[in-house]
Image: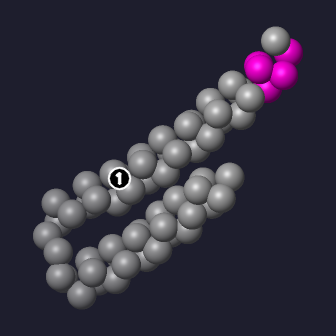
Amino acid sequence: MALENEVDSLEKLYQKNHVRRMAKNECSPNAAIFSDLVSNFERVSDHATNIAFATFREEEYI
């Protein structure tokens, strides 16, 4: 869970910094892909956490 919380925090930080760069015209319009990637990586982290918890619960019943 600590890693999941860190990933959540990093996603917020990266998104905030990205908006700042876009507001200052420091990146190209194609940089919107960055935001999508960061969001998708965070979702992968959520899914991995769910899989880990499901696996641990399954082992309790074996």
Left/right of residue 55 with respect to residue 8 in the rendered view: right
Taking 50 as reference, is 12 above or below it?
Answer: below
Q: Quadrant of residue 49?
A: top right
Residue 62 visible to the viewer: yes
**Residue toward you, 45 or 30:** 45
Instruction: Give the prevailing secondary structure in the magenta stretch.
Output: helix
- Residue 32, position in %: x, y? 26, 60
Q: Is residue 59 magenta?
A: yes
- Residue 2, position in %: x, y? 65, 59
Q: Amino acid at mark 1?
A: Asp
Which residue: 69% across, 25% down? 55
User: Which corner quadrant holds the C terminus?
Assistant: top right
**Residue toward you, 23 or 12:** 12
Q: Quadrant of residue 59?
A: top right
The single residue placed furthest to the bottom in the displayed view is: 24
**Residue toward you, 32 or 10:** 10
* Residue corresponding to mark 1: 36
Q: Is residue 39 magenta?
A: no
Which residue: 41% across, 69% down? 15
Could you tell me which secondary element the residue under label 1 belongs to? helix
- Residue 1, position in %: x, y? 68, 52
- Residue 4, position in %: x, y? 60, 54
Taking 29 as reference, is 52 above or below it?
Answer: above
Density class for disc 1 (Cα within 10 Å; few <14, some 14-19, many ≥20) is: few
Left/right of residue 31 with respect to residue 44 in the rendered view: left
Q: Which residues are magenta?
A: 57-61
The single residue placed furthest to the right in the displayed view is: 61
**Residue toward you, 62 or 17:** 62
Q: Quadrant of residue 33?
A: bottom left
